[in-house]
Amino acid sequence: MAEDLKREKTRADFVDKIWVVFTSLKLVITLLLVLSVLSVIGTVIEQNKPLQEYYRFFRPETVDLFGRLGLLDMYHSWWFTACLALLALNIIACTMERYPFIMRGMKKQSAVLDEKLEAGLTNLAKIKYSLPAETVESRVTAIAGKNFPARPVVTEAENARHFFYEKGKYTRIAFFLTHLSVLVIFIGAIAGSLFGFKGYVSINEGELISSVQARQGENKGLNFSVKCNSFNVDFYPNGAPKDYRSDLSVIRDGKEVIRKTIRVNDPLSYEGITFYQSSYGMLPDTVTFEIRGKNDVSLGNVSAPFGKRVDIPGGDTRIEVADYRERFNLSDGSEAGPVVGVNLYSQGAPPSGIWISETRPEMNRYGAYSFAVKGVKLRKYTGLQVNKDPGVWVVWTGCIMLVAGIMMAFFMSHKKFWIRIGKDKNGRVEVTAGGTANKNKHAFASEVERMVESFREVS
Amino acid sequence: MTNSLLFGVSIFVYFFSMVLYVSYLAFRSETLGKVATFTLLAGVIIETAAISLRWYESYQMGIGRAPLTNLYESLVFFAWTTAIVYLLMERKFGIKTAGAFVTPFPFIIMAYASLNPNEIQPLVPALQSNWLISHVVTCFVGYAAFAVSFGVSFLYLFKVKAENRPAKNPGGLLNYLPASDLLDEVGYKTIAIGFPLLTIGIITGAFWANVAWGTYWSWDPKETWSLIVWLIYAAYLHARITKGWRGKKAAALSIVGFSATIFCYLGVNLLLSGLHSYGG
């Protein structure tokens, strides 16, 4: 029996100890500072870059070590997440610990200004009048009413009338707002990563898509299609970009449901999925080549649509347009102007890719063939960031709670003020007044001071 | 480019106000103190005119945007808000001797700004947003409040250190400095103004990022450093409000906080890469 009791007691002690740790201010401050120090690491070591980038700066074994420690994606590493989880537990524990105190602070106060209460008040003032009690009461309460718009609680006790004024009682919930807001933001972020996705899609002008490339790698099908009617970009006279515009249509069951021109800072949303203007580019629609074979004999013109293998006349080789660059730098650093990337397929040889330049025909050779670009029909495409985040509104709710809570915590307080109108030993009317505030005591003291000053002027 | 002329004048005026505040600390003449305050005020007025003129000129150039969009403009705005926050604190708390520790900021920041390119550039698409003004203004007024707190905390540490040394000349400089308690209080009050503003600045930034790029938080170095600054001041406020940390420890944390602020503002742009490459 004694053993059991002892064990139970140790367990209780253990729970108590954990509770003390989780509600201690030391843990809060340590966590905040540890989180800030850890965050620094992620800004010094660039996060989520391709491995080759790291090899440029670090030795392979260092990169390997970083990778194993989670330093290359540290904001999602188990230890960073653990710190955030600890912070969340810490906030929950502190909120539970503070709950009864805050509730007690919001409970009804004694409406009677007795001697015990008097002793605890700052700025206590006693003023004597040679006026009838009714006159004093109406004037003094009128003055107090200006500072405290809510009706006072009036009580008759101990041969005196007591007036209890109160304002800003609910500013005491500032603690809950600021602390729970952090949890709400966490919940929103978790919801977003569980039920949402981020992706990218490029749409050629005039074409439509009905799936996007999610960041996790898989293709994400949509319940609708998005068509890019047109894409345009404007430039300032100095050449800097001024405006990117994609004219988009959302098409569902063959019908256009929304049409909107999106810009940077002005996305399109449909069914919780949002399309953001992110990039743009050009792709060749059709390229016409003049091809020469052995002994520089012209084989005629060949028009190759993008991505299609086209036969080169008089042989077994096929050509496919795969890419286009407006500017191209050769390995010696010189400019080759616009180039078309093509793949060439010959029987019995592995496919081979070459760049065909519009301005530098000497580089356009493949085996016995030489190529000249006769015409390029380009097609613009718009690059869109695609995002679904059902948690985002939870995050904004948390942010609003946080700001409201901080404002209340720093700039508002729960103010209480009592007036007692009675008689002194000599039968003269005597007003006793004083108040307390839970914060900004100095400012409230001068507010009371001014009221009392006005009380004295009553005659 | 008349605005740059006015900015040039304001650098000189800020310089003189700094000299005057330091001489006020040295000679303790009330007249000198008044002149120092008025000089700083004059600097603010000239700079206000310069900023307004720059705004107006951008409209005349057909660009038409708030002057808050590159490193030069943000520096100038930072200097301006620091001077204003200090003047307000001086008026409210009568801590004129702290001026010698705060007024170097407007001057140094303006001088540094003048080394940066100052043409009025048109806005790239990402910056064309209604969130620009609210995001930049809240962040920088917050930074300015932290700068003032830094100056005052510095003065606090300076005073406490001097007090602990055996007095050489009673009735000297030490007695002339504001009471330590007051310095401590002002150091806290300015953070209590800066922290809510930084919070709003981070949130408006997140909201804007969500509209422009589709993610409200991407652990970009600028975002992360603003969070670091926020965490440090959050630690300060918890330590102070709940545990009653005052004096030296609080002043030291305020100094650490402001150092992180400066890194968040300038260090990130100069040393790290990221989304804020245009220098805001």
Image (cartoon, grey):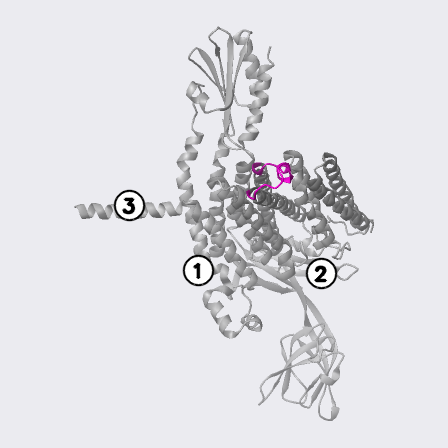
Judge from the rendering whether residue B124 lies leftward or rightward of residue B274; answer left or right: right
Discs 2, 1 touching: Cβ within 8 Å = no
Discs 2, 3 touching: Cβ within 8 Å = no
Residue A208: percent from left, percent from top: 61, 63
Q: Which mark is residue A232?
A: 2
Res A267 visible: no
Q: Are marks 1 and 3 on the same chain?
A: yes
Q: Which mark is residue A12?
A: 3
Residue under pointer 1: A78
Quadrant of the image containing the C terminus of chain A = top right
Q: Chain of mark 2?
A: A
Answer with mark 1 or mark 3, whichever residue precedes in sequence.
3
- The verdict on residue A250 being magenta is no
**Residue nearest the viewer, comparing A226 with B84:** B84
Residue A223: percent from left, percent from top: 53, 58
Range of the magenta residues?
B164-181
Q: Name the magenta segment's main secondary structure.
A: loop
- The verdict on residue B174 being magenta is yes
Report, in whole angstroms, how far the alpha carbon at label 2 lies from the one at label 1. Answer: 44 Å
Q: Are marks 2 and 3 on the same chain?
A: yes
Q: Chain of mark 3?
A: A
Residue A457: percent from left, percent from top: 61, 14
- Residue placed furthest toward the left: A1
Q: From the viewer's perspective, is the residue at label 1 or at label 3 nearer? A: 3
| Three-letter code for the amino acid on which mark 2 is drawn | Asn
Q: Chain of mark 1?
A: A
Q: Alpha-carbon neighbours of circle 1 within 10 Å: few (<14), some, or many (≥20)?
A: few
